[in-house]
Amino acid sequence: MLRCCILEFDGSWEKYLPLIEFAYNNCFQTSIKLASYEALYGCKCRIPLYWTELSEKKIHGVELIRKTEEKVKMIRDNLKADSDRHKSYADLKHKKLKFKL
């Protein structure tokens, strides 16, 4: 996942590392059935990332928030693609086992 982001951000990945960490920690994990952040702290992460959905145009830094939303979406898409790729590899080697009782 980090490799995908490094390639996507053209050498400026250090600047976006906190966003990568945020996106990873707030993505749904099928193994534990919730996000890592939620598992650790017992509540969903609440941040003012999606202020633009509230139609508040007077907020300072709306452009920064818009760019951040775009970056987080791109990172999440990369995470999904990476997860799907790993699943496809695992599915190739998966064998159904039957046990006799």
Image: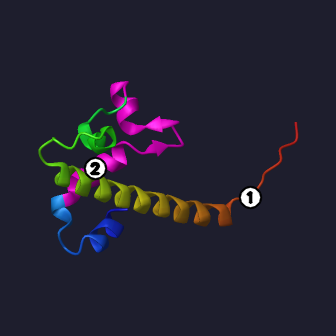
The quarter of the picture where residue 56 lies is top left
Mark earlier in primary sequence (2, 1) = 2
Considering every residue shown, the one lying at the far top of the view is 42
Q: In the rendered structure, does residue 30 fall within the stretch colored magenta?
A: yes
Marks 2, 1: nearer the viewer: 2
Is residue 101 positioned above or below 60 on the image?
above
Give the structural element (helix, strand or loop) at label 2: helix
The residue singled out by tag 2 in the image is 21
For the point 33% across and 68% down, the residue is 3
Instruction: Name the residue nearer the viewer: 100 or 10.
Output: 10
For the point 21% across and 44% down, the residue is 57
Three-letter residue code for mark 1: Lys
Three-letter residue code for mark 2: Glu
Q: Quadrant of the N terminus?
A: bottom left
Residue 16 picture location, percent across and down: 21, 58
The stretch in magenta equals: 16-43
Q: Quadrant of the C terminus?
A: top right
Give the structural element (helix, strand or loop) at label 1: loop
The residue singled out by tag 1 in the image is 95
Residue 85 picture location, percent across and down: 53, 65
Binning the other alpha carbons within 10 Å of mark 2 as few (below 14), some (14 to 19) or many (20 upward) gives few
Instruction: Name the residue nearer the viewer: 98 or 35.
Output: 35
Considering every residue shown, the one lying at the far left of the view is 60
For the point 43% across and 60% down, the residue is 77
Residue 45 placement, left or right of 85: left
The disc placed on residue 56 is: none
